[in-house]
């Protein structure tokens, strides 16, 4: 059986995923203000949370052990795991769709994280190297993967149809979740069970909702790539 040659886009997706994985472990936030009790460099794994005192003063502190933030850290580890295995998936199976979704959440979150950096002061001083690398290489990985999918739009037509329906459903998903969340609280009496059920349910639904909304610009981009590819192929045939 002849070994399939790796394309440049495949190698680029694998390389960017490797850098993205490392970037999530590097500092995203540098707290240098002398007014802060907690100072230093922080990655996503050990990121402090912002708290507001009764007097309205905002400070950074680590969340207490056993709080809901411990569960969010588990979600983060799962996302990092998918980014890591995507490196090998691209080198072995070459599945651009896996790059799209494994890199989507951390990359989009990295752009939103600039609002958190703004609260700490100067952008150049407070933004860590991991945040810059995530912005750059996460975006490259996603763009290259969606370009590959767009060039083969007809092959993945059913997939794109499913993704569009998924995104449209996300506009009505919050309307469904609000009464359903209230139903869970009514049916469950143990406080600890409530926290676990509601957290697991809302986290899964939020991830589904977030990906469905965030993929819309990329679905449009893939459609544009497909139209450009069709025009180029049409011109070549008539040349």
Image (tube, rainbow, N blue to C red):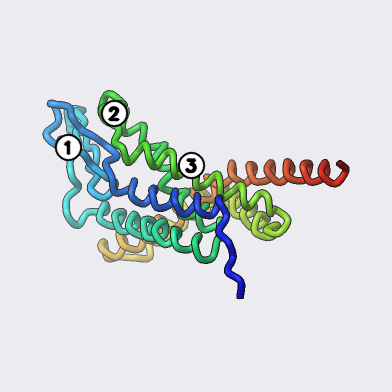
Q: Is residue 212 left or right of residue 232?
A: left
Relative to the observer, which residue lies in front, 159 or 127? 127
Q: Do the residues labelled 3 and 1 touch (CB within 8 Å)?
A: no
From the image, tell me which residue sits under label 1: 40
Classify 34 as above or below 174. above
Query: In the rendering, at what x and y percent does residue 73 appear?
Result: 29, 54
Q: Distance between the residues labelled 2 and 1?
A: 15 Å
Q: In this view, does 190 lie to the left or right of 147?
A: left
Please tell me whether mark 1 sits on a helix, a strand or a loop.
Answer: strand
Q: Which of marks 3 and 1 is nearer the N terminus?
A: 1
- Inspect this view and state whether residue 23 appears: yes
Q: In which quarter of the image is residue 50?
A: top left
Question: Mark on residue 119?
Answer: 2
Q: Distance between the residues labelled 2 and 3?
A: 24 Å
Residue beneath the point at 69% across and 60% down: 158
Query: In the rendering, at what x and y percent does residue 80 appear?
Result: 36, 56
Please tell me whether mark 2 sits on a helix, a strand or a loop.
Answer: helix
Q: Residues within 10 Å of mark 2 (few under 14, many from 20)?
A: few
Q: Residues within 10 Å of mark 1 (few under 14, many from 20)?
A: few
- Inspect this view and state whether residue 185 appears: no
Residue beneath the point at 45% across and 59% down: 86
Residue beneath the point at 45% across and 50% down: 103
Q: Quadrant of residue 239?
A: top right
From the image, tell me which residue sits under label 3: 139
Q: Earlier in the sequence, mark 2 or mark 3?
A: 2
Q: How far apart are marks 3 and 1 (CA)?
A: 27 Å
Residue beneath the point at 69% across and 53% down: 153
Q: Are marks 2 and 3 in contact (CB under 8 Å)?
A: no
């Amino acid at each position: 059986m002849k070994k399939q040659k790796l394309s440049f886009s495949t190698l680029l997706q694998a390389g960017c995923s490797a850098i993205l994985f490392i970037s999530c472990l590097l500092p995203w936030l540098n707290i240098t203000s002398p007014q802060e009790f907690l100072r230093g460099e922080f990655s996503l794994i050990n990121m402090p949370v912002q708290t507001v005192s009764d007097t309205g003063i905002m400070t950074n502190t680590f969340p207490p052990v056993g709080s809901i933030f411990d569960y969010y850290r588990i979600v983060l580890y799962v996302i990092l795991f998918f980014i890591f295995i995507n490196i090998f998936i691209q080198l072995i199976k070459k599945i651009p769709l896996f790059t799209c979704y494994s890199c989507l959440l951390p990359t989009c979150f990295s752009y939103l994280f600039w609002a958190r950096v703004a609260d700490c002061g100067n952008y150049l001083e407070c933004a860590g190297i991991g945040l810059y690398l995530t912005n750059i290489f996460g975006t490259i990985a996603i763009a290259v993967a969606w370009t590959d999918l767009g060039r083969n739009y007809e092959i993945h037509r059913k997939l794109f149809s499913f993704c569009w329906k998924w995104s449209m459903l996300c506009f009505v998903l919050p309307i469904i979740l609000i009464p359903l969340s209230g139903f869970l609280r009514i049916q469950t009496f143990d406080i600890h069970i409530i926290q676990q059920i509601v957290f697991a349910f809302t986290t899964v639904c939020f991830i589904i909702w977030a990906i469905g909304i965030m993929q819309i610009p990329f679905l449009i981009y893939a459609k544009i790539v497909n139209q450009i590819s069709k025009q180029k192929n049409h011109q070549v045939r008539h040349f």
